[in-house]
Every structure is written in C-alpha cells, then in structure tokens.
Image (tube, rainbow, N blue to C red):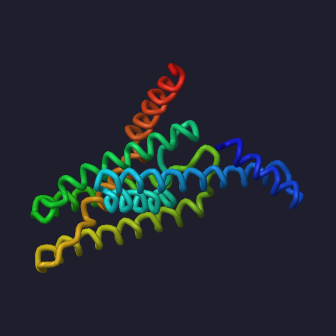
Amino acid sequence: MENLARSIANKISKKLGYDDEKTAVIAYGLIGLFQFIIILCACALIGLVFGFFWEAMIIFWGAGLLRRVMGGAHSSGFYSCLFISVVCICILAYICSLIKVYSDSFYFLLAYLVIYAAAFVIVYKLAPVESPNKPIKESKRVRLRKKALMTLGIFAILTVAQWIINNLCDFKFYISCALTVSVMWQTFLLLPAGKAFVSAADRIFNAGKHTK
C-alpha cells in the first residue's frame, strides 16, 4: 500500500513538475488517506458483525478529530498502525457496548468528569505532540492547543448533556461512554506510557510478521 501511494505520488508529481520534496508530501498524504479509509472500513465491518458499530464509529471519529489537533504516539509502520488502530478501537468499542446500559448512573458521570478534567490538564501541558515527519512551529502549536481544548470542551458538553437527557427523559441514546473513551484513549497517547504502549504493540506485530 505504501508503494502504491508513492507510485501515485510520483505520477502526480511528474505531470505537475514537482520536486522530490513535494512528491514526498503527496505520498505522505496518500498513505494517511489509505490508512484512514482502511481503518474506517475495518472498524465499521467488525462493529456491524459483533454489534458495536455505533460505539466503534464514535471512538473512530472522536479520536480522529482529537488526533488532528493533539497529535500523539505514532506507530513505526503502515501495517502496524492499521493493526494497532483497528484492534484498540474495536476492543474499546466492545467494552463500551457492554457497559453503556449502566452509564446513566451518577458514578459514571463522576468518572466522565474526572477523565475530562485530567484530559484538559494533560492536553494543556503536552499537546500538540508533533510527528517526526511534521515538525510544528510555535505559533501553530498554540493554535492547535486552543483547538484541542475547544474540542475537549465540546465533547464534555455533549457527554454531560446526553447523561442529563437520559436521566430526565424516557428516550434513551448512548454516546457518552464511547465519546469519553475516545478522549481517554487519545489523551493516553500523549503520555510517555502511551508511547511505550505503541512501541510494545509495534514489536509484537513485527515479531508476529517475522515468524510467518
């Protein structure tokens, strides 16, 4: 898939007369697009089969929106990134599907508030975490941090609003658990522990690939 992205990038650059630097940027963007599409389709399909489609979609889009402005730990390769992303999103979505019926309790609301409070502190101190391939200028860093905090604020409002509606009305819908988990997951990837987790998952994936 990476070779396909580079091949397409080379063809585009050849037609437009771009240099090697612009070609690399196009290839990087195409690789990211391919990853996005594959992860989305895989999580949607697995979620449909095993009954956690909506939870998987909320975590996928929630974590994706946050990652754009927060950054976080990166996998070392294309396929290991796919593996880690799909497995983690699906496991988290499955857990959310099991516990969401209990999420109208006051204890869950307290847990949500604690997670969001911790996320605000961590994001303020650490975000955005830049990719090795995309260094961030200080002015852009400030803008991204503000966007990250605003996004967290919106997610927190949606989470609390859903909890209140479920407790006041007969109509029930559940987004709070998956939305909060997407925040927790993406915030975790800002921390040294998140980087260590991704590195360990990388090693497991690569070890499994080499033993085949």
Residue at left offset 36%, top offset 62%: 58
Residue shown at 29% from the left, 59% from the top? 178
Q: Nearer the viewer, residue 40 or 114?
A: 40
Count the marks: how many?
0
Q: Does residue 115 appear in the picture of this structure?
A: yes
Left or right? Give the position of 154 relative to 133: left
Describe residue 124's horizontal placement relative to residue 36 as left or right.
left
State the image coordinates of residue 121 (x, y, percent, origin top left): 34, 56
**Residue 13, x across and y down, in percent:** 83, 55
Judge from the rendering whether residue 173 lies leftward or rightward of residue 151; answer left or right: left
Q: Residue placed at 23% from the left, 67% from the top?
A: 174
Quadrant placement of the N terminus: top right
Occupied quadrant, residue 106 = bottom left
Residue, far front = 49
Residue 121 visible to the viewer: no
Q: Nearer the viewer, residue 212 or 87?
A: 212
